[in-house]
Image: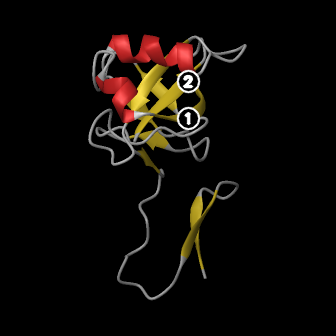
Amino acid sequence: MAHFAEIDKNNIVIRVLVACDDDIANNGGDQSDEAAEHFKTVAPLSSFGVKWIQTSYTGSFRKQFAGEGDTYDQAKDKFIKAQPFASWVLDENDNWVAPVPYPDPEFPARATWNESTGQWDIS
């Protein structure tokens, strides 16, 4: 099944809906502007929506499956997850990373980010 992300004027994902594969194949094919335009006739844009963009459930294109609150980067033609914490920054692969490296993954504990201290809490 094909999936489309509705984005607003700021390129933020509002919602993600499922589309019929045959409908996509008969109207321009995967990742085409024609398929996205046709999808508007099947699922009209919401009052804040400006465009449908196809997303991949498997992450085989546009970096990853879009989710509500994610951003579509038009220049890079990919979806970027919503920033989890204000202090986190995007790395060279457009993944969010903490300002402090995650504790040793071999350490037999669980770490949770604490935004107020800017550190990992070990439990």
Residue corresponding to mark 1: 16
Check disc 1 and give the amino acid type.
Answer: Val
Check whether the beta carbons of the residues at disc 2 and disc 1 lie within 8 A of each other. yes
* Residue 2 percent location from the top left of the image: 40, 36
Q: Is residue 22 left or right of residue 53?
A: left
Q: Depth check: 55 or 82 in front?
A: 55
Q: Choose between 5 and 122: the one closer to the eye.
A: 5
Q: For numbered disc 1, what is the local secondary structure?
A: strand
Q: Amino acid at mark 2?
A: Glu
Does 29 sit above or below residue 68?
above
Tag shown at residue 80: none
Q: Residue at x 55, y 39 (%)?
A: 82
Neighbor class of circle 1 (other Cα within 10 Å; few <14, some 14-19, many 20+) is: some
Q: Is residue 11 visible?
A: no
Is residue 14 visible in this depiction of the protein?
yes
Q: Position of residue 85 (x, y in %)?
A: 60, 46
Instruction: Residue at 29% x, 25% y: name it.
Output: 25
Q: Secondary structure at mark 2?
A: strand
Please tell me which of labels 2 and 1 falls first in the chain.
Answer: 2
| 110 is higher (above) or lower (below) than 22 | below
Q: Which residue is mark 2?
A: 6
Placement of the N terminus among the 4 image quadrants = top left
Image quarter of the C terminus: bottom right
